[in-house]
Amino acid sequence: MDKEKIKQAVTLFLEGIGENTKREGLTETPERIAQMCKELFAGYESSVAEHLSRTFSSEQTGLVVEKDITFYSVCEHHLLPFYGKVHIGYIPNGRVVGLSKLARTVEVYARRAQIQEQLTDQIADAVMNILEPKAVLVMIEAEHMCMTMRGIKKPGSKTVTISTRGCVEGDSELKQEFFNLIRQ
């Protein structure tokens, strides 16, 4: 991440909206924004493989669900936040992953400029490709500030995206079990 470029961009932005960048409240803003970007976009420096590749043998053959994983991301279209909950379910194929590793996978992808549809697919693909379970289900429910504070201005509206991989594709019973578990 190029901290100096971010600081220059923030200074130009502030000048562009008519602000005095020498004003007391703004003199350190470019530095603060550069530091914030380091945190908000840390996903570019991380790999999900480092999290999902640490697995354990397991005889578990039923659905494993980690639900209500809180996330925060930034919309790549407007650079405004979107946030919500991710629910991940998978059917192990002889191996399971530590539950915190699923949350870490969410963080890697959420900490990038994103769209929700892509985020959902990235999580599902990572779990499927690295963990190699029989099936994966990922559901994200999120509120987008680009819908809340600008444009249509509809606070409280939620966008829901779902991605499935593996043997779940035609299994409506398994999908229903997943939805029942995340609604409890």
Image (tube, grey):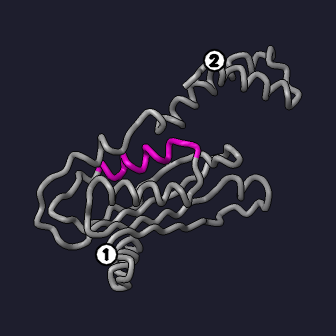
User: Which residue in the protein does label 1 denote?
Assistant: 167
Q: Quadrant of residue 50?
A: top left
Q: Residue at x 11, y 66 (%)?
A: 59
Image spot of residue 7 (x, y percent): 67, 21
Q: Position of residue 4 (x, y in %)?
A: 63, 17
Which residues make up the magenta segment?
A: 100-113
**Residue holding disc 2:** 4
Q: Earlier in the sequence, mark 2 or mark 1?
A: 2
Give the position of the C terminus as an image quadrant. bottom left
Mark drawn on residue 76: none
Nearest to the observer: residue 183 or residue 163: 163
Question: Is 48 inside the magenta-drawn segment?
Answer: no
Above-or-below relation of 142 to 11: below
User: 159 left or right of 127?
Assistant: right
At 47% across and 39% down in the image, what residue appears?
A: 43
Q: Residue at x 72, y 26 (%)?
A: 10
In the displayed structure image, the side of residue 17 where residue 45 appears, left or right = left
Element type at mark 1? loop
The amino acid marked with disc number 2 is: Glu
Residue in the picture at 55% in, 53% down: 83
The quarter of the displayed image where residue 9 is located: top right
Instruction: State left or right for residue 90 relative to residue 44.
Output: left
